[in-house]
Image (cartoon, grey):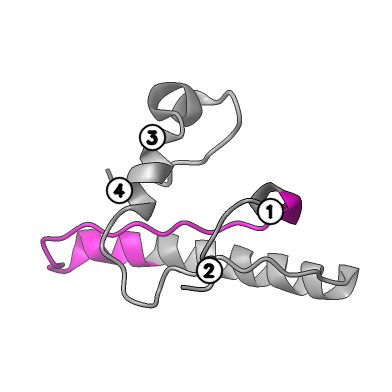
């Protein structure tokens, strides 16, 4: 693949793969590297998080470019990042959130 697949509602990735791509990504075997934080943030902290996310996107693109120049591992890796409003009430009926 090699290119960033940008998830835009109604966009080509959404139309071609739908939520199935995200579901399959999340279902992979994970150590402690897959974490969903549901926090409240101030405007200042949210801006700082958004800046760090932008920096991480840049780093991921640079790493992908470098992988084309030098030998890389045979395995592909996915990086799912984002920051969006979330209604915690959607999880009201979910049991065992902390297990």
Give the position of the N terminus as an image quadrant: top left
User: Of discs 2 and 3, which sits in the foreground?
Assistant: 3
**Which residue lies at the image location 88% right of the left edge and 72% below the top edge?**
42
* Sequence order check, earlier mark of 2 and 3: 3
| Residue that numbered label 3 is attached to | 20
- Residue 17 visible in the current orientation: yes
Task: Judge left or right: residue 44 versus residue 94.
Answer: right
Within the magenta stretch, is there residue 85?
yes
Between residues 31 and 67, which one lies in front from this camera angle?
31
* Sequence order check, earlier mark of 2 and 4: 4
User: Of discs 1 and 2, which sits in the foreground?
Assistant: 1
User: Of discs 1 and 4, which sits in the foreground?
Assistant: 1
The Cα atoms of the two marked residues, 1 and 4, are separated by: 38 Å
| Residue that numbered label 2 is attached to | 56
Q: Position of residue 13 (x, y in %)?
A: 45, 30
* Sequence order check, earlier mark of 1 and 3: 3
């Amino acid at each position: 693949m090699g290119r960033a697949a940008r998830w835009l509602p109604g966009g080509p990735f959404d139309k071609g793969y739908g939520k199935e791509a995200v579901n399959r990504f999340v279902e992979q075997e994970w150590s402690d590297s897959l974490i969903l934080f549901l926090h409240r943030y101030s405007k200042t902290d949210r801006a700082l998080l958004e800046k760090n996310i932008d920096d991480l996107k840049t780093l991921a693109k640079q790493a992908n470019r470098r992988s084309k120049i030098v030998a890389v591992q045979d395995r592909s890796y996915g990086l799912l990042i984002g920051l969006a409003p979330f209604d915690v009430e959607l999880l009201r009926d979910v049991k065992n959130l902390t297990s």
